[in-house]
C-alpha cells in the first residue's frame, strides 16, 4: 500500500499517518490482544488492566487520527472513511475498556465482548487496507491514462 502510494507521489506524511499507519496499528492490536489472552495468567487482573490500557490508547489514538485526517490535504475523506477509519476503531477500543472493567465479574461476557471488538478491528483493518490499495491502483491508472488522452488530442 505504501509502495503504491509512494510511486504515485500522491500521499503525504500526514495522509499516510491518517490512513495507512492506523491499519497496521489495528492489526497489531488484534495480535497483541490475542497473545495476551493466550498467556497463562494466574489471575484476570493483568488481563483486565491490559485491555483497559490498550482500549484507552486506542481511543486517544483515534482522536489523534481525526486531527491528522483534517490537517492533510491530499485526500478528502468521504462518509465511508469517517465511519471505517475514525468511528469504528475508537468504538472497538472503547469496547475493550468496557470488557476490561467487567472481566473480573463476568469473564465470559467480557471475553465475548473482547472478541467482538477484535473482529471489528480486524475486519475494519482488512476493509481499510483493501480500500486504500484499490483507491491507489485506480488513481494510478487514471494518472497513466491522462497523458495518453492529452496526447491523442
Image (cartoon, rainbow, N blue to C red):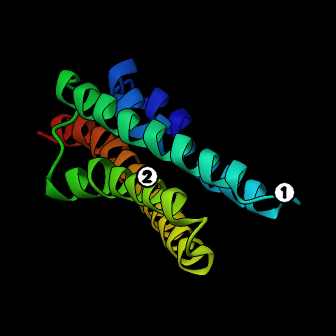
The residue indicated by pointer 1 is: 41
Q: Residues within 10 Å of mark 1 (few under 14, many from 20)?
A: few
Q: Name the quadrant containing residue 150.
A: top left
Q: Would you identify the image quadrant in which residue 134 lies?
A: bottom left
Q: Position of residue 93 (x, y in %)?
A: 43, 52
Q: Residue at x 37, y 34 (%)?
A: 60
- Between 146 and 104, the residue placed more toward the observer is 104
Position of residue 145 in the picture relative to residue 94 (left or right): left
Residue picked out by circle 2? 93
Relative placement, left or right, of 43 versus 63 is right
Q: Nearer the viewer, residue 31 or 55?
A: 55
Identified at 23% across, 27% down, the residue is 67
Q: Residue at x 28, y 47 (%)?
A: 86
In the image, residue 79 sits, relative to residue 11, either above or below, namely: below
User: Percent from the top left, x then y, of residue 142?
Assistant: 27, 46
| Residue 108 to residue 8: above or below | below
Cα–Cα span, label 2 and label 1: 22 Å
Amino acid at each position: 500500500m505504501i509502495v503504491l502510494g509512494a510511486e504515485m507521489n500522491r500521499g503525504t506524511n500526514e495522509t499516510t499517518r491518517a490512513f495507512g499507519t492506523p491499519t497496521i496499528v489495528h492489526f497489531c492490536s488484534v495480535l497483541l490482544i490475542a497473545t495476551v489472552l493466550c498467556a497463562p495468567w494466574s489471575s484476570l487482573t493483568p488481563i483486565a488492566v491490559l485491555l483497559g490500557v490498550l482500549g484507552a490508547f486506542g481511543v486517544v489514538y483515534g482522536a489523534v487520527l481525526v486531527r491528522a485526517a483534517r490537517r492533510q490535504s491530499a485526500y478528502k475523506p468521504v462518509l465511508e472513511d469517517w465511519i471505517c477509519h475514525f468511528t469504528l476503531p475508537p468504538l472497538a477500543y472503547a469496547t475493550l475498556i468496557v470488557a476490561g472493567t467487567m472481566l473480573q465479574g463476568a469473564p465470559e461476557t467480557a471475553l465475548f465482548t473482547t472478541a467482538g471488538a477484535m473482529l471489528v478491528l480486524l475486519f475494519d483493518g482488512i476493509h481499510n487496507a483493501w480500500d486504500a490499495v484499490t483507491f491507489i491502483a485506480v488513481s494510478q491508472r487514471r494518472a497513466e491514462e491522462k497523458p495518453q488522452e492529452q496526447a491523442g488530442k
